[in-house]
């Protein structure tokens, strides 16, 4: 199968995940770039940031049109992660490839387990927002984005529900604002690795992901969110197991 077809297919899946779930696209993009398209882990994490940034901005627009984005609270949450994202992005190029692969596998497994666990679907509307906790969570997500090239949406959504008391639809929409800000910040520090990106693969991958994000938004309105999360989590566990085995060989 040609690299173009693989890039288009993988991009569509990434876009669907981001559009439907408000996260999870990057934890599929990196292994797809590494194992299907032959990227190194360092190049894949940079390429994933490019793909996720473009796709998240597209999905953000779609959710904003539906009124599902809390701009002020989301901006404050995202701002705490900007500097950690930039610092971790600069440090990632100095880490050995097997360590990055193992760390990514661990994060993917964590994401899958969180999605499989019954979560809070309704947050208490009167729950007080704890600024220090919100800032700490935002900073942690930013560092994760910079280091591993993941947007952190799979962690941002439950954090927005539990820490900032968002209802689920607002958490999904607002997480895309957080992903976009963190990804842009991390990408700004990766000039060296961006120079070697194969745009003949990344460009169609990104295009398919952007189109998939619109479909994901429509899919989320028709299919049970629980079913979507469980299917994604099972696939993610398989990816994590494969990547961990590869890192340990």
Image (cartoon, rainbow, N blue to C red):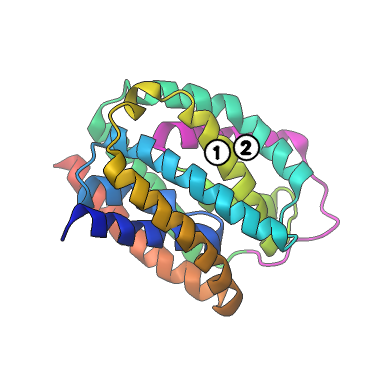
Residue 213 lies, with reference to residue 81, above or below; the image says below
Residue in the picture at 74% in, 49% down: 164
- Residue 140 at x, y = what percent? 56, 35
Quarter of the figure that contains the C terminus: top left
Q: Mark 1 points at which residue?
A: 141
Secondary structure, magenta segment, majority class: helix
Q: Position of 108 compared to 74: left or right?
A: left
Residue 170 lies, with reference to residue 104, above or below; the image says below
Residue in the picture at 40% in, 23% down: 191
Answer few, some or many: residues within 10 Å of disc 2's Cα (few below 14, many 20 plus, some between 14 and 19): many
Residue in the picture at 36% in, 39% down: 47
- Residue situated in front as seen by the camera: 192 or 141: 192
Q: Name the residue under label 2.
A: 138
- Residue 221 at x, y = what percent? 61, 74
Q: Are marks 2 and 1 in contact (CB under 8 Å)?
A: yes
Residue 115 lies, with reference to residue 105, above or below; the image says below
* Residue 233 belongs to magenta span: no
**SS state under label 1:** helix
How far apart are labels 2 and 1 at the CA level?
5 Å
Q: What stretch is highlighted in magenta?
A: 120-149
Residue 89 lies, with reference to residue 107, above or below; the image says above
């Amino acid at each position: 199968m040609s690299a173009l077809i693989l890039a288009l297919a993988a991009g569509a899946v990434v876009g669907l995940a981001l559009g439907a779930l408000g996260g999870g696209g990057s934890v599929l993009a990196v292994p797809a770039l590494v194992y299907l398209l032959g990227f190194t882990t360092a190049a894949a994490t940079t390429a994933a940031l490019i793909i996720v940034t473009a796709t998240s901005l597209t999905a953000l627009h779609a959710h904003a049109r539906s009124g599902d984005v809390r701009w002020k609270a989301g901006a404050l949450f995202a701002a705490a992660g900007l500097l950690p994202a930039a610092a971790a992005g600069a440090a990632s190029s100095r880490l050995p490839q097997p360590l990055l692969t193992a760390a990514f596998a661990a994060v993917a497994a964590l994401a899958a387990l969180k999605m499989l666990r019954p979560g809070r679907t309704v947050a208490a509307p009167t729950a007080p927002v704890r600024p220090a906790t919100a800032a700490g969570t935002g900073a942690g997500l930013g560092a994760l984005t910079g280091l591993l090239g993941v947007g952190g949406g799979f962690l941002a959504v439950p954090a927005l529900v539990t820490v900032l008391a968002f209802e689920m639809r607002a958490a999904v929409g607002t997480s895309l604002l957080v992903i976009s800000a963190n990804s842009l910040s991390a990408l700004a520090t990766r000039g060296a690795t961006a120079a070697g990106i194969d745009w003949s693969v990344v460009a169609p991958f990104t295009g398919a992901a952007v189109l998939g994000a619109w479909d994901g938004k429509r899919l989320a309105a028709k299919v049970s969110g629980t079913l979507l999360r469980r299917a994604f989590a099972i696939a993610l566990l398989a990816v994590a197991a494969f990547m961990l085995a590869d890192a340990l060989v």
